[in-house]
Image (spheres, rainbow, N blue to C red):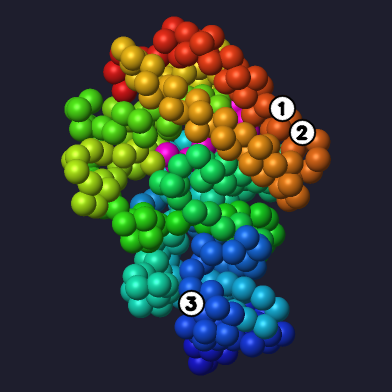
Amino acid sequence: MGWRILIIMLFGLTSFAVSSLAQVEKETGRNSLFEGEEKLQIKLSADFTSLLKNKEDENYIPALISIRFSKKDAFERELRLKPRGYYRKMNCGFPPLMLNFKPDTLIVDDGKYVKVKLVSHCYDSDTYRDYVLKEYLIYKLYALISPYSLRVRMADIEYRDTGKRERNVDQLGFLIEPMDVFCERTDVIEIEGKYFNDAEINELEADRVAIFMYMIGNTDWRIKSGHNIKFLKIKNHRKEEVVPVPYDFDHAGLINTSYALPSEWSEAERVTERDFTGRCRTFDTNYDVLIEDFLKVKEQMLKTINEFEYLELKQRKRVFKFVEDFYEELEKPERFKRNLHNSCMDRY
């Protein structure tokens, strides 16, 4: 059986034109999976029966993917995938996935997407769907306060199980921009490693991350160990400093997942209780700058939440109130800074 015929049988692509990604980009003007706000339509076919039974297995399994940009434009590719992550990998009914495309099959801009992270639904329910939406929203909020934020793209995903159980699921998910693409876009270099001296870390950007994590009620991060943090260096910068980039926000109080707990280094009793786990500072210079930065984007933050139509109004109101409470603290800067000094950590 021909390869294209097999793809069409598996994905049901006969209702729209099948194009190469290059053709799609030429016709639609898109040159990146992470440009645009509309949801992608993805069909992913693999032996999910075996994958879910052996989530601890580090080996990739073969799969087929179709990504539809519009009713007329789509492309399909073979790829490999495997479960990824830490907590969610072993504790979710359906774990996040690492999509591993073959070289030269997903060429975007002047580089390639080879490995792309997919955030999935954990369990097939409206509650876990809302968790995905809130985590996606956090990435969007961080982009308002930092130029060093990973882009995300939401997608309706049809998971088609070719295994024995044939369990098919339609759920929401989102793709996270690969670090190599992020580095090319922002003109930075990713730095491999987990341990850096205080002098090697850009204090202002580290404090920006820390205050944002405080805003969303997240203690599940740490610069010291590189926990849920990537590191980069700005090209041609006069100082050889490392800038932290956060990711994986599912333990944030803003989301308030059923499984989330404060980190062991936090004094918070629950994730909805804010606890500042950033570095202690002798002077308030960074805090003063960042308070002003956060206040400048207050209206954008609240508007982004309020207009996030994919999330039901009731859930939007909860997220809105959670962030609004943070801004009420921020608008009393001296008290806010005292709070940071009282709960900061002596080391990252």
Query: Type of residue at label 3?
Result: Arg
Whether residues under marks 2 and 3 lie with C-beta atoms below 8 angstroms apart, the answer is no
Q: Which of the labelled discs sits on residue 81, or is there none?
A: none
Give the position of the C terminus as an image quadrant.
top left
State how far apart marks 3 and 1 are (Cα): 42 Å
Q: Is residue 120 above or below residue 277?
A: below
The image position of residue 327, as x and y in percent, is 62, 24
Mark 1 burial class by Cα count in 10 Å: few <14, some 14-19, many 20+: some
Count of numbered badges drawn on the protein: 3
Q: Main secondary structure of the magenta part?
A: loop
Q: Magenta stretch: give its range.
A: 246-255
Q: Secondary structure at mark 3?
A: strand
Q: Is residue 265 visible?
A: no
Which residue is pictured at 41% across the width and 46% down the height? 148
Q: Is residue 307 visible?
A: yes
Q: Residue at x 38, y 24 (%)?
A: 286
Kindly state the secondary structure of the residue where label 1 is placed.
helix
- Mark 1 lies on residue: 321
- In x, y percent, where is residue 66? 57, 74
Residue 317 is marked as: 2
Callout 2, which amino acid?
A: Lys
Residue under the point 29% across and 18% down: 347
Front of the two marks 2 and 3: 2
The secondary element bearing badge 2 is classed as helix
Amino acid type assigned to the residue bearing label 1 in the image: Lys
Q: Which residue is mark 3?
A: 77
Which callout, 2 or 3, points at the residue further toward the start of the chain? 3
